[in-house]
Every structure is written in C-alpha cells, then in structure tokens.
Amino acid sequence: MSRRFDNFQKVVKSNRNLIEGTDENKKMRKIISLALIISLLTGCGLVIRKLDSSGWDEHRQAYEKSQTLPPLEIPPELATAKPS
C-alpha cells in the first residue's frame, strides 16, 4: 500500500509541475511577457512617430481644408438606358 501511495504522490507532483511550471519556467514566462508588453507599447509610439515624420499630419490638414467639386454631368446620350 505504501508503494502505491508513493507512486501516486510522484504522479501528482509531476502533474502539478506540468500545470504550474517550475521556477525556471515561471521566470521565463515573466521575461517573455515583459518583453512582449514592452515591444507592443514601444511599437505604438514608433508607428505614431513614423506617421508624423512622413507628413501624415500635413496631408490630413490639406484634406480638411479641401473643397468639394461640383457633381459630374452625365451626357444625355449616356444617361438613357438602351433596351437589351
């Protein structure tokens, strides 16, 4: 009976290590998570700086100042539908 219980404890311990992870795995997860968060946060700033340096803001201002054109006129011969 004792041998079975010892085997059961070993199985439970190995399964717990798989689920919870070892200390080394926990450290690695923290490092990867931190690196991912930093790259995502700095990536957003880099994109905004790239858009600003490319003149994106100037194009946007030009678009906002633009005026609409008059509607296109369709010639009468093209406006009538021909029966098929």
Image (cartoon, rainbow, N blue to C red):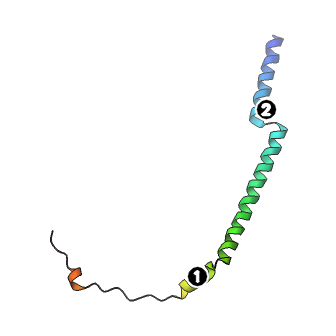
Sequence order check, earlier mark of 2 and 1: 2
Q: Position of residue 48 (x, y in %)?
A: 68, 71
Relative horizontal placement of residue 81, taking residue 7 as reference (left or right):
left
Residue 54, picture quadrant: bottom right
Question: Which quarter of the figure is the N terminus placed in?
Answer: top right
Q: Which residue is mark 2?
A: 17
Q: Position of residue 4 (x, y in %)?
A: 79, 13
Furthest-left residue in view?
A: 83
Identity of the residue drawn at 82% across and 36% down = 22
Disc 2 marks which amino acid? Answer: Asn
Relative horizontal placement of residue 57, taking residue 25 as reference (left or right):
left
Q: Position of residue 53 (x, y in %)?
A: 68, 77
Question: Which quarter of the figure is the C terminus placed in?
Answer: bottom left
Regarding mark 1 in the picture, which secondary structure is present there? Answer: helix
Residue 44, picture quadrant: bottom right
Identity of the residue drawn at 25% across and 85% down = 75
Q: Which residue is mark 1?
A: 59
Query: How packed is label 2: few (under 14 Cα within 10 Å), some, or many (20 or more)?
Result: few
Q: CA distance from mark 2 to mark 1?
A: 56 Å
Q: Mark 2 and mark 1 in contact? Answer it, CB < 8 Å.
A: no
Disc 1 marks which amino acid? Answer: His
